[in-house]
Amino acid sequence: MLDDVVFWVLAVVAVAAGVAVFRVDSMARATYALAVSFVAVGLVLLLFDLQFLGVITVLMMVMEMAIMAIYMIMFMGMNPALMPMSMVHAKRPSLAVAVVTFVVLASGAVLIPWPSRRGAPASDLTVSLGQALMGSKMLVMMTVSAVLFATIIGALVLAVPRGRYDRLGDDLRGRVDADQPDGAGQ
Amino acid sequence: MTLQTVLLVAAALFSVGLYGAISQQVVVMVMMGLELMLNAVVLAAGGFWWFLSPAPDGQVLLLVVITAMTVEMAMGFAVATLLHRTRNEDMTDMATDLAQ
């Protein structure tokens, strides 16, 4: 019973915060609303006894939203907490697509005869996840590791304004331009 | 709390995220919409795992979805930074020529 009450409170908070992301009139508030939605979903995962994944979701998303708020300030060149904004296009078609999507998904959720539960959760779910990742699901772990490493490199290549290959050429033997503020060796 | 109610909440989150991803003009706001959609996928996957088959495989799938969120965010920020630096743009409508 208590679980049901907590779930519904968290569900309402998650959806309301999600709606608020696109309703509030400043980007900073939108960022915080998204963080609240993520925290609510992370807490729902805790109701499913997914302690590790729930805590990871909460921690990671709160940090992401903090970074996102910084990006807002960087790119918008204004105080995003104070500056009202409404930058949307195709509002009505977007709303129609969203409503149709919800109706289709909700119909599936309600009308499909879902099978009953098979098996029982392990006594310690975090341990079982760790054992799966280091055992039978090792390939997933290895793939995720490579993808994350590639993401680091790709993001750096895109975000760094002027890398050493730009400054020194493909063979890295070009002359160092001391006049450049980000010149090699500085 | 049943699988149906969890999926209904996830459907609502997904739809709201989809609305944002389609309607917003600022690149970072579009990313917020995508994040909200992935948030719904995490919730639905957690519900499926708990109510249908609480085996470790489902947890691994959830971990992959959370990783996808991270990758999307990191690359999205990188592309937004590149767009802003090279073209001084932060809106999708300004960068439509990239599709050509």
Image (cartoon, rainbow, N blue to C red):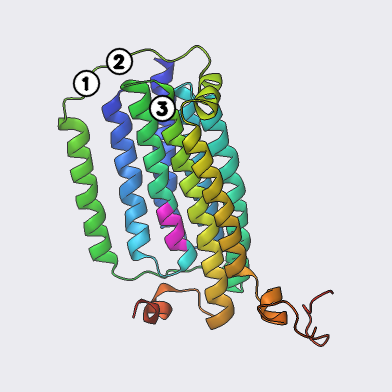
Protein chain holding label 3: B
What is the distance, in whole Å, between disc 2 and disc 3 at their CAs? 13 Å
Q: Is residue B97 toward the left or the right of residue A137 in the image?
A: left
Protein chain holding label 2: A
Q: Which residue, given by chain and number where applicable, does mark 2 sit on?
A: A118
Q: Which residue, given by chain and number where applicable, does mark 1 sit on?
A: A115
Q: Residue at x 40, y 21 (%)?
A: B55
Q: Which mark is residue B57?
A: 3
- Say which of marks 2 and 3 sits in front: 3
Residues behind callouts 3 and 1 on a single chain: no
Place of residue B10 in the rendered image (x, y in percent of width and height, measured from the top left): 34, 39
Q: Is residue B1 in view?
A: no
Tell me which corner region of the image, top left, top right, bottom left or bottom right, holds residue B99: bottom left
Q: Residues within 10 Å of mark 2 (few under 14, many from 20)?
A: few
Q: Secondary structure at mark 2?
A: loop
Question: Which SS type dominates the magenta stretch?
Answer: helix
- Say which of marks 3 and 1 sits in front: 3
Place of residue B6 in the rendered image (x, y in percent of width and height, measured from the top left): 33, 31
Q: Secondary structure at mark 1?
A: loop
Q: Residue at x 44, y 51 (%)?
A: B35
What is the distance, in whole Å, between disc 3 and disc 1 at their CAs? 18 Å
Q: What amino acid type should be assigned to the residue bearing mark 3?
A: Asp
What is the distance, in whole Å, between disc 1 and disc 2 at their CAs? 9 Å
